[in-house]
Image (cartoon, rainbow, N blue to C red):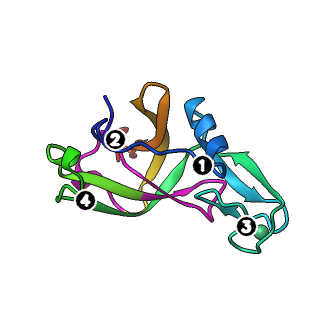
Amino acid sequence: MSYLPRELPHPEPSPEDVFYWDNCRDRKLVIRHCNSCHTFFHPPMPSCTACGSVDLGWRQVSGSGTIFSYTIAHHPVHPALKTSTPYNIVVVMLDGASDVRLVSNIIGAQPEQIRIGAPVELCWDEIDKGMFLPRFVLKTTMDAAGRETL
Ligand SMILES: [Zn+2]
């Protein structure tokens, strides 16, 4: 089951990001990388957002990251979200591509469990047949007593 209703509009790949979406289908998270200044940026653009170079590549990232910011939405901004509130929207800083802030959601967490700085791991959410969105789960750790903590 998808985190948000399948009735929401789906991403429509453009020439700039079709490679990104193709990799999402294969459950690989790739990020645009500038071969001139080595900046990572997202969403994909035809030129580097830092230096303007068109010498660009892609780099696969692990999907580990940290919550940079978040909000809990209580108002359905689309009719399909009427039964999904409250839901979270997070901005994730990706390990290995710390220039990037990826907007996504945390799956399987209560709103009060979400906090800035929390470590997260990538998971894939199939929003339609063969279309996957990168979403995240909170990474659990063990405290000194061996209890699982978030
Ligand atoms: Zn650049």
Left or right of residue 122: residue 5: left
- Region rendered in magenta: 91-115
Q: Earlier in the sequence, mark 4 or mark 1?
A: 1
Q: Kindly state the secondary structure of the residue where label 3 is placed.
A: loop
- Residue linked to disc 1: 14
Q: Earlier in the sequence, mark 3 or mark 4?
A: 3
Looking at the image, is mark 4 or mark 1 nearer the viewer? 1
Kind of residue indicated by mark 4: Ile
- Estimate the spatial distance between the alpha carbons at disc 2 and disc 4, rounded to whole Å: 13 Å
Residue at the outermost left position: 83
Left or right of residue 146: residue 74: left
Residue at screen point 74% across, 49% down: 58
Kind of residue indicated by mark 1: Ser
Q: Residues within 10 Å of mark 4 (few under 14, many from 20)?
A: some
Within the magenta stretch, is there residue 111? yes
Kind of residue indicated by mark 2: Ile
Give yes or no for contact between labels 2 and 3 (Cβ–Cβ under 8 Å). no
Q: Earlier in the sequence, mark 2 or mark 3?
A: 3
Looking at the image, is mark 3 or mark 4 nearer the viewer? 3
Determine if residue 4 is in view. yes
- Estimate the spatial distance between the alpha carbons at disc 3 and disc 4, rounded to whole Å: 32 Å
- Estimate the spatial distance between the alpha carbons at disc 2 and disc 1, rounded to whole Å: 27 Å
Determine if residue 138 is in view. no
Kind of residue indicated by mark 3: Cys
- Asked whether mark 3 lies closer than 8 Å to ligand 1, one says yes
Image quadrant holding the N terminus, namely top left
Residue at screen point 55% across, 47% down: 64
- Residue linked to disc 4: 72
